[in-house]
Image: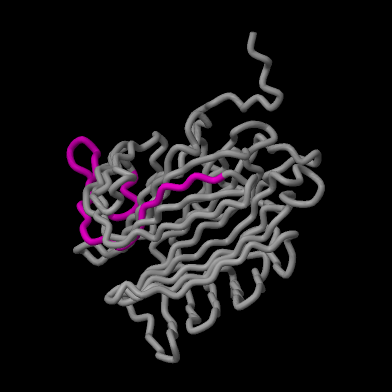
Amino acid sequence: MTAPDPFPAPAVTPERELTAPVSLTLPNGRLNPAAVGFARSPLVDTSGIGGRHGWGRNKRWEYWNVITPTHIVALTISSLDYAAVHEVWVFERASERSWGRGATVIPSRDMVLPGSLGGGIAIAHAKDLAITVTPTGDGGVWRLHAAIPDASFDITVTRPAHHDCLAVVVPWSTRRFQYTVKDVALPASGTITTEGVRHDVPAGSWAVLDHGRGRWPYDVAWNWGAGAGVLPDGRSIGLQVGGRWTDGTGATENAVIVGGVLHKISTPVRWSYDLAAPLRPWRVTGGGLDATFTPFYDKRSAMNLGILSSRTDQCFGEWTGTFTWTDADAADGDAPDAAGTHEVAFAGLIGFAEDVHNRW
């Protein structure tokens, strides 16, 4: 006989939309059932993640990625309770040269992460690495600054007015759960410096945020993909897709944002790719989305510290495809056909797709 699950998962129900602020956790540290769902803005208070509740399972991070016509940059500030894990990466697209520095700090120290998104500055310091992420105003503008030997960047990211993000609470159980904010298709500007040479971040550069707060299982794998660009009619479009880690929870992190309006895909999408040949095209389908991702570079990384390990293939490239949805309100300005269906075709959305396996 199989022993009962000590942390049973909440019943899987259709996704609901959160429209008012809510706490992720109850006073006892467990998942607040009222927080389970998705939102178009970061409504969830995650200040209960950390401290004595769930120590060792708490995971908190800020990840930013910015893709320009000439460069790709990324920063990570994270706390796993028992360790802080940070990274700065700068990639020159034409030459495929890269500058990078990672740090695993045990025990976790010399870092600051706000309790909730936009609640303050995020800071990480380690040998040959410095990162600050500073929200300004009402959270619609972010300044990203990172420096490592021979490379740095100072980039401002602006969320356009009335631009939706995708915020989702994923419930594995009452004690294991995650709040994720994926904010895609955000215009970026600023400078990147490599070996003393300054490069502008011009119009047509796009940023994506992955903000995470939660309590995770020890062994987990996931897919994540994002892309951004402009449709022929001038509207921005952002693609956000995920997989595996949400299976069986009743939640997904899938959506397409057209002209700033989020269209939630509440069914799992299907990922098709060959990890043995990751630069071959990937395909993601389901929920009205039919997208092909054609990579040009694989950022492969691995870490093994015994009980703590990770393996990532993060491929950068372009997304092409179509997205079809039904929306009687036509909130984003698309006129539906006779059946009330809307469709957009997209090509050349710059972005990434990844396959990750962590033991943490």
Let me know if residue 356 is in the magenta part.
yes
Placement of 297 over or under 146, stated as above or below? above
Q: Foreground residue, 12 or 244? A: 244
Placement of 123 over or under 349, stated as above or below? below
Residue 333 is left or right of residue 33, and the answer is left
Q: Foreground residue, 64 or 186? A: 64
Residue 332, horizontal then vertical, whole percent: 33, 54
Residue 182 is left or right of residue 44, and the answer is left
Res. 292 visible in picture: yes
Res. 335 visible in picture: no
Residue 287, horizontal then vertical, whole percent: 32, 37
Rendered residue at 76%/41% (across/down): 29
Placement of 165 over or under 253, stated as above or below? below
Quarter of the image where one finds residue 232: bottom left
Q: Foreground residue, 164 or 90? A: 90
Q: Give the range drawn in magenta.
A: 329-358
Q: Farthest residue to the top: give it.
A: 1
